[in-house]
Image (cartoon, rainbow, N blue to C red):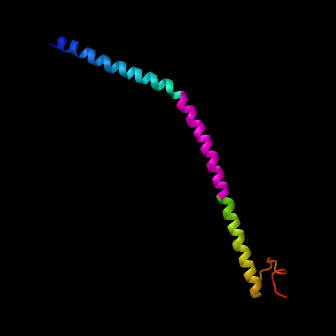
Amino acid sequence: MRILLSLLLLPALSGCVVGTVARTAVDVAALPVKVVSAGVDAATTSQAEADQKRGRELRRQEEQRGREARQMEERCRRGSPRPTDLCAGSQPR
């Protein structure tokens, strides 16, 4: 009985094994292409992200300089400048 059952299951198992081997072969063949394309995508994305980050940093610095300039002008207008403030051009005559 076992032998008969084994003979009946043998074709079904071999189909699974062949399918698995074929899928593995396709995966192995496609792996170098996937690795290269992932590397190219990562490099491109990294440069774009670096550019965006640099742009955000420059905008943040410009906003900070603008705030400091407005604060300095306000201090000069009120007549209580700091020693580092450049108020000569800001004071009314």
Which of the image's four quarters has the C terminus? bottom right
Q: Residue at x 71, y 71 (%)?
A: 66
- Provide the residue span drawn in magenta: 32-55
Which of the image's four quarters has the N terminus? top left
Inspect this view and state whether residue 80 appears: no
Return the x and y of residue 13 as percentages of the image width and height.
29, 18
Inspect this view and state whether residue 44 appears: yes
Return the x and y of residue 80 as percentages of the image width and height.
76, 86
Q: Residue at x 31, y 18 (%)?
A: 15
In screen coordinates, is 48 left or right of 9?
A: right
Return the x and y of residue 44 as percentages of the image width and height.
62, 42
Return the x and y of residue 58 as percentages of the image width and height.
69, 60
Question: Looking at the magenta stretch, what is its main secondary structure?
Answer: helix
* On screen, residue 12 above or below 77: above
* On screen, residue 75 above or below 61: below
**Magenta residue check for 25:** no
As drawn, the residue found furthest toward the left would be 1
Total numbered labels: 0
In screen coordinates, is 86 left or right of 71?
A: right
> Can you tell which quarter of the image residue 22 is in?
top left
Q: Residue at x 22, y 12 (%)?
A: 7
In screen coordinates, is 11 left or right of 42?
A: left
Q: Residue at x 50, y 27 (%)?
A: 30
> Can you tell which quarter of the image residue 8 is in?
top left
